[in-house]
Amino acid sequence: MTIGILSERTQCTVATIRYYEQIGLLPQPERSSNGHRYYRDQDFERLTFIKRCRDFGFPIDQVRSLTNLFEDGDRACVGVRNLAQAQLEQVRAKMAEMRQLEAGLEAFVCSCDAGCTGGLTRDCVIFDQIALSGATAARFVATEVKRT
C-alpha cells in the first residue's frame, strides 16, 4: 500500500508516518523504481499499534519499548505492565493537576460573579487573582474552594 493509503487506514498523517520512519519507530519502507514508498501489512499493524500507544499518552521512548516488547512475544509481560503502570501514574498526576486548575478557575469565576461582573475589565478581580504570586494564589484558591 502507498503512504496515502496507510495514512487513511491508520488515521495518521503522512508527516507523522515519515517522522516515525525518521526516528526508527517504523522501518524504512520498500520503494518502487519511481521512488514511491510501499508498505506491507506488518507496517500497518505496527503503525496501528504505535498510534494506539500514542492515543494512551505514552511518550515516544516508551512507545519504542512497547513496540519492541510487542514484536518480541517471548519476553515476560511484567515489562509491559511496568510501562503501563508508569503511564497510569503520569495520567493520575496530570489529572490531579487539572483538578487544581479547575478549582482555581472556578474560584476566579465565582469571585468575578460576586464582585465585578457587569463592570469594566480594568476592575475585574480575575486580573488581580491571576497576578498573585504562586503561594498567595494557592492560599486564595484554597480559601475560595472552602467557601463553595
Image (tube, rainbow, N blue to C red):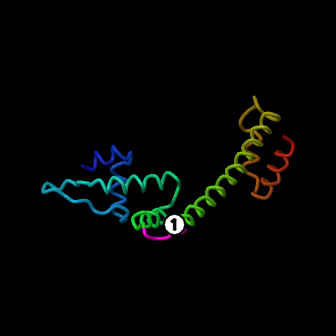
Q: Position of residue 20 (x, y in %)?
A: 37, 59
Amino acid type of disc 1?
Answer: Cys
User: Eyeballing the image, is 46 above or below 61?
Assistant: above
Q: Decide if residue 137 is on the left or right side of residue 97.
A: right
Query: In the displayed image of the protein, which residue is found farthest to the left?
Result: 33
Helix, strand or loop at label 1? It is loop
Rendered residue at 31%/57% (across/down):
42
Rendered residue at 37%/57% (across/down):
46
- Label 1 Cα neighbours within 10 Å, binned few <14 / some 14-19 / many ≥20: few
Rendered residue at 87%/42% (across/down):
147
Q: Position of residue 128 (x, y in %)?
A: 76, 46
Comparing 79 with 94, the one in front is 79
Comparing 112 with 128, the one in front is 112
Comparing 32 with 138, the one in front is 32
Q: Label 1: which residue?
A: 77
- Residue 31 magenta-highlighted: no
Q: Decide if residue 121 is on the left or right side of residue 62.
A: right
- The stretch of residues the image draws in magenta is 74-79
Question: Which of the 4 quarters of the picture holds residue 26?
Answer: bottom left
Rendered residue at 72%/44% (across/down):
105
User: Eyeballing the image, is 73 above or below 10?
Assistant: below
Comparing 42 with 56, the one in front is 42
